[in-house]
Image (spheres, coloured by chain):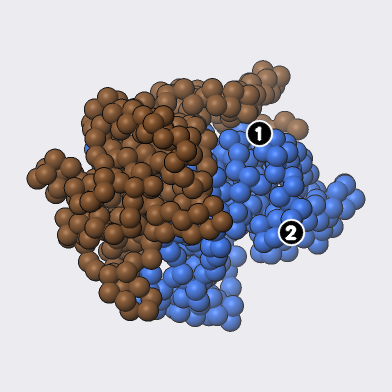
Chain colours: A blue, B brown
Amino acid sequence: MGHAKPLGGKIFTPPILFLSALFLISAYFLVLRYINGIGYVSNLTDNQSWGIWKVIGVLVGAAFVNGGYVTAFFVYIMNKGAYHRFVRQAVLFSLLGYSFAGLSLTYDTGRYVNLLNFFIPKYMQPNSALFEVGVCITAYIVILAIEFLPALLEKIMPEGQAQGLAAQLHGFLNKILFLTVAFGVVLPTMHQSGLGQLAMLFGQKLSPLWQTPLISLLYVISSIFMGFCIVTALECVYTSNFKKKEYVRLLGTMMKVAGYVAILYIILRWIEVVRNGAVGQAFVFDLKANFFWLEWILIIVGLYFVRNEQARFSPKNLFLGASFMMSSGLLYRLNSYIIGYQSVQGQSYFPSFPELMISVGMFALQLVLFVTIVKIFPVMEKE
Amino acid sequence: MKIKRRNFLKGIAGAGVGVAASPLLTGKALASEVKKLKPNHVGMLYDATKCIGCKSCEVACKKANNMPIEYDPAGIYDAPRDLSEKTLNIIKLYKGPEGTSFVKRQCMHCVDPNCVSGCPTSALNKTENGIVTYDKDACCGCRYCQMNCPFNIPKFEFNDFYGEIKKCELCRTTSLIKDGQPACTAACPTGAVIFGTVTLLLAEAKQRLKDSPGDYIDHVYGEFEGGGTSVLYLSKIPFEKLGLPNLPDYSQASLSEGIQHTLYQGLIAPAVIYAGLAAIAFKNRSGKEED
């Protein structure tokens, strides 16, 4: 612990300025949304009332940032200390991702002030999977903030001095870390399963290619391999550490585990497709079927890149494998909420430009914050 | 110690998969807490063969609930095409090879409604007498009810900066108090739609099927569909053609809640897993690594 250092460097680089510009465009459309209503900026209708905001903001957001979840499990539960170096950036990425998932609800819900009702006992509705998701996400944001707090404290703590309030708090957080970490594993499991469970109430409106009583379990399993993938992909993008053999070996091991989890996921998915009697529907090659197959192509290509020890020794293969497998998991979420969903015959939905820009801009802001924070605070290990 | 922890982890994983996979094994059996129709539940019986399509019910509904007039896409006065945030009740016409039939659409007031089960903030509720109600002060506008209603009934004011969900509430604050029945049944000149307790309406529907079997498909729609509804339908045209989906005889809500309650009963499973994980993380604190 404590090898983490700020990456340093200029803050306003061209990519950061570009991403900031994207955010400003989305801010303009957000203002329009709050003045004129959801219908003014989006293509959402009574028949498709959840769209890209929900899928990118909450579903993809929550899955994309599962690195914090799997690394915490690897390091603190499986006791693989060597992976400790991946924890902080994963936790930061998760913290940002979840905060933005929560934030997206303030423009995605129609009566956003009443989101507070989630925390007022007389309005709580524990039968609802959506209530469970909301509560778990909120709790997890708090846990992630506690997990990330030491990085902030190390920044303000005087070098080499183990005194003062900051140092005391740092020590205390270290002592209760085992309590925090356990929450950090239980809460995401609960809310990933909740996100899957939401789709169960869609009933027949969701195509049998995706609808199954096991959908909550499938969401949990896919979020696990996606967590490993995002940690791997992020490392490849943000550090040059992968030139070290030892480092590549660690990432390779993570992708190996991800591969096994992905295979389990593929088997379970297909058992359910067969059990639903939906195999025929996969071969009509309409929009739904094509997107269904795209999921499988992506995951198989991803698995191919990380197929054996030798393949996993190349950082390029690790990055491509992680990216493809992750895309498949993201597409699964898009498919089970939008592509595979149909209220009325002939219904079609494609997000409007402002709607898309709001999601893109919020994601851009998230990246800006991530890059800026790792430059200022001790998050990543630099050797 | 090492072996012990591994076994514990396996135990947790095993239990987790077991519980999560239980719906696979038991299927419908998990839908154990099925909500049942009560004798005092009120509803409507719509007999499509008696409806003449006069739309008196539409007009009465608008008046009673103070709903705005809706123009069709061509600008024709008061001619909604479908249910919307302005139209809670509508008469539509089906014309096809099977024949011609009107159909009245409004909230079905399900016995075990998905919308009530899924609503995170208790904005949708089922009252003692079976009416599915909406409370805008509780609603956060998440629109999950729209996503999960098998009949696509709840409508949202997408063009309002702080919209509400709109749906039929059986005139519970208007005609039901004043006239003892909803505006639509009171206005119907042919008795195509009648109001009463669901038990009596079901008996009446079955009597009609018995008395003139040639006039109807031998089925009361809503007796079992989706776990049962408080609005029942009789027709000579297949119900699916009238826009009434072919649903299983249990509610999706009972299935989903069955799984949810199994996983989270008294929060025991999450608490046990949490304690186990915390214990492992505590033991690993020393930082000694094993590989």
Q: Residue at x 27, y 70 (%)?
A: B78
Question: Furthest-right residue in view?
Answer: A310
Q: Residue at x 52, y 35 (%)?
A: B248
- Residue A152 location, x and y as percent? 46, 55
Give A217 or B282, whichever is nearer the viewer: A217
Give A323 or B280, whichever is nearer the viewer: A323
In primary-sequence order, the first of circles 1 and 2 is: 1
* Residue that numbered label 1 is attached to: A79
Q: Residue at x 54, y 22 (%)?
A: B29
Q: Nearer the viewer, mark 1 or mark 2?
A: 2
Q: Is residue A289 shown left or right of residue A92?
A: right
- Residue B49 location, x and y as percent? 38, 47
Task: Please give the count of numbered marks on the rendered protein.
Answer: 2
Q: Is residue B182 shown left or right of residue B8?
A: left
Give A304 or A235, whichever is nearer the viewer: A304
Which mark, residue A41? none
Which quadrant would the N terminus of chain A be assigned to in this image? top right
Q: Looking at the rendering, which quadrant does residue B6 occupy?
A: top right
Mark 2 Cα shell of 10 Å, populated few (<14), some (14-19), many (≥20): few
Q: In this rendering, does residue A304 appear at all?
A: yes
- Residue A52 location, x and y as percent? 51, 63
Which quadrant would the C terminus of chain A be assigned to in this image? bottom right
Mark 1 Cα shell of 10 Å, populated few (<14), some (14-19), many (≥20): many
- Amino acid type indicated by mark 1: Asn
- Chain at numbered mark 2: A
Secondary-structure class at tag 2: loop
* Residue that numbered label 2 is attached to: A285
